Image (cartoon, rainbow, N blue to C red):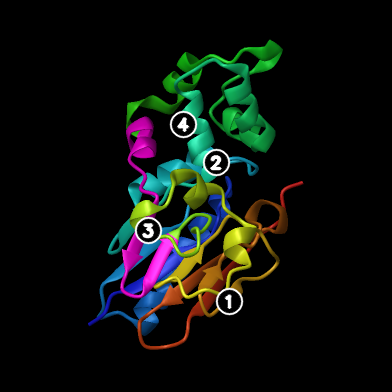
């Protein structure tokens, strides 16, 4: 039988919501698809904004028992990865201006007085987390679905997509009504509710600010179903 896929939107340091969502998915599968293989796809942006980026990374690295786990790279992971290689203030500011300071705090790394030392970040992350970070793929294909963080350039085969577009694209993709050859499952562009279009589904529901984390259930037989967990917004 066709495997069931659960795709989870942008987490942004909300380990409390991720834990609840994993529990919700485990229960949902037991009730609906106990006899089928299942995969959980996380579409990126695990860090920044929320308070527990370190715990989110560690939970994702552990995976969920009984499920294949896929973790895609988001633009926020890419920004942090760039800082592992340099003390260039512009590179670090690109990350910190996108709420990277919350991730530094979760790893107890100080950037006070303009100290941007990649050695501090490397030591705090440790070899296992860095290896995991550097291994994150940019896309994943399952049947009729293409999972990616931000989206794709319409009309361009996936093999010809540029990393920056898969991680950062917005309106050129969001406004397109073109058939992409796959239904694209993505995050990156936050909203109050999931966005469902014939050619794409967005599952970023602004977890750190709204306290709402969303997943979509794709079973190959029925229309997409959405699971939501709700917590307190980050103040």
Gap between marks 3 and 4 measured at Cα: 23 Å
- Determine the secondary structure under disc 2: helix
> Could you say where residue 10 lies in the image, as x and y percent from the top left?
55, 55
Q: Give the mark, 3 or 4, whose residue is nearer the N terminus.
A: 4
Gap between marks 4 and 2 measured at Cα: 9 Å
- Circle 4 residue: 81
Marks 4/2 in contact by CB < 8 Å: the verdict is no
Marks 3/2 in contact by CB < 8 Å: the verdict is no
Q: Which mark is residue 76?
A: 2
Q: Is residue 192 left or right of residue 1?
A: right
Q: Nearer the viewer, mark 3 or mark 1?
A: 3
Gap between marks 2 and 1 measured at Cα: 24 Å
Which residue is pictured at 49% across the width and 54% down the height?
Answer: 149
Q: Nearer the viewer, mark 3 or mark 2?
A: 3
Q: Range of the magenta residues?
A: 129-147
- 183, above or below 117, in the image: below
- Circle 3 residue: 158
Q: Give the mark, 3 or 2, whose residue is nearer the N terminus.
A: 2
- Circle 1 residue: 196
Which residue is pictured at 71% across the width and 59% down the height?
Answer: 210
Q: Give the mark, 3 or 1, whose residue is nearer the N terminus.
A: 3
């Amino acid at each position: 039988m066709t495997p069931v896929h659960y795709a989870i939107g942008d987490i942004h340091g909300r380990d409390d919501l991720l834990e609840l969502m994993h529990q919700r998915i485990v229960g949902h599968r037991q009730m609906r698809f106990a006899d089928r293989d299942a995969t959980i796809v996380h579409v990126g942006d695990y860090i920044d904004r929320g308070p527990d980026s370190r715990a989110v990374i560690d939970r994702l690295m552990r995976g969920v028992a009984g499920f294949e786990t896929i973790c895609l790279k988001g633009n926020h992971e890419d920004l942090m990865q760039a800082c592992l290689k340099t003390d260039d203030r512009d590179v670090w500011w690109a990350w910190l201006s996108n709420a990277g300071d919350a991730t530094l705090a979760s790893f107890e790394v100080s950037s006070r007085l303009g100290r941007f030392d990649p050695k501090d970040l490397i030591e705090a992350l440790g070899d296992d987390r860095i290896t995991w970070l550097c291994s994150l793929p940019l896309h994943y294909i399952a049947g009729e679905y293409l999972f990616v963080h931000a989206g794709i350039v319409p009309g361009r085969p996936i093999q010809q997509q540029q990393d920056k577009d898969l991680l950062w694209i917005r309106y050129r993709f969001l406004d397109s009504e073109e058939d992409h050859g796959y239904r694209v499952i993505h995050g990156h562009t936050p909203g109050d509710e999931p966005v469902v279009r014939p050619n794409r589904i967005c599952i970023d529901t602004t977890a750190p600010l709204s306290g709402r984390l969303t997943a979509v259930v794709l079973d190959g037989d029925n229309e997409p179903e959405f699971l939501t967990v709700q917590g307190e917004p980050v103040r």
